[in-house]
Amino acid sequence: MCLDKRTTYQGRNEREIKLLSNKTFKIMKYIKLFLTSILILALSSACTGQDRIIKASDLPTKAQTMLNDIFKGRQTTLVQRDKDGLKTFYDVVLDDGTKIEYDDKGEWCEINSKPNSVPTSLIPSQIIEYVKQNFANANIVQIERDRRGYEIDLSTGIDISFDKDMKVRKLDD
């Protein structure tokens, strides 16, 4: 049996092999595109989280107590539960425009009272004293706390970051 030089793999000639490899390449390209699309769809749906409007009575007890004691007389206009992966947060908007974010235990994470002042009973005394001594005419209109410390915004537009020991980390104007 004499083999032609153009006869190669399993008796197929070069032209047939090229056609097969082009078809295989196209099929692999479509499979890759399909799998990439599925991955993007899955990731985008996972990242969007689950935001739901809820009743104020569905907030954690600690958050309800704070609203009733400190923000007495103000009505909630929006209460929303944000589920972001494993963490749950609650966003509350009051009728005067104050926005409060709570964690899943009912501890406040952020309070934005612009243009009003954040209630002093929610601000650590060291921060109040620092602001009185250094920015006598300013009010604290926003406060945020996390595991690293506190960040505040003053009515004068100055932002101050404090560490856990209430030492100034950063001051921006």
Image (cartoon, rainbow, N blue to C red):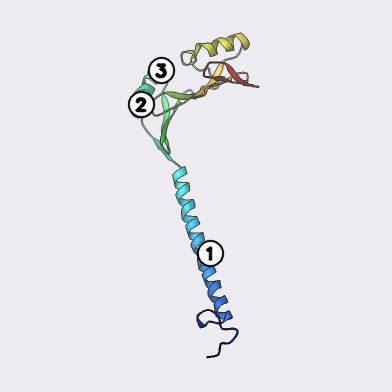
Name the residue located 38 percent from the left edge and 18 percent from the top edge.
68
Nearest to N terminus: mark 1 or mark 3: 1
CA neighbours of label 3 inside 10 A, class few (<14), some (14 to 19), many (20+): few
Q: Position of residue 52 (x, y in %)?
A: 40, 37
Relative vertical location of residue 14 with respect to residue 29 in this rendering, above or below: below
The secondary element bearing badge 3 is classed as loop
Residue 73 shows which numbered tag?
A: 3
Query: Along the polypeptide, which appears first: circle 1 or circle 2?
Result: 1
Residue 143 at what x, y percent from top left?
52, 21
- Give me the C-alpha separation between circle 3 and circle 2: 19 Å
Q: Give the quarter of the image for residue 49.
A: top left
12 shown above or below 103: below
Q: Quadrant of the C terminus?
A: top right
Q: Residue 127, located in which quarter of the rendered image?
A: top right
User: Which residue is at the far front?
Assistant: 1
Residue at the spot 47% in from the left edge and 58% down from the top edge: 35
Image mark for residue 29: 1
- Residue 121 % position (x, y): 46, 13
Q: How many marks?
A: 3
Identity, as a three-letter code, of the amino acid under mark 1: Lys
Q: Which residue is mark 2?
A: 60
Instruction: From this view, report whether residue 19 is shown above or below residue 158.
Output: below
Is the residue marked by circle 2 packed among few (<14), some (14-19), or many (20+) residues within 10 Å? some
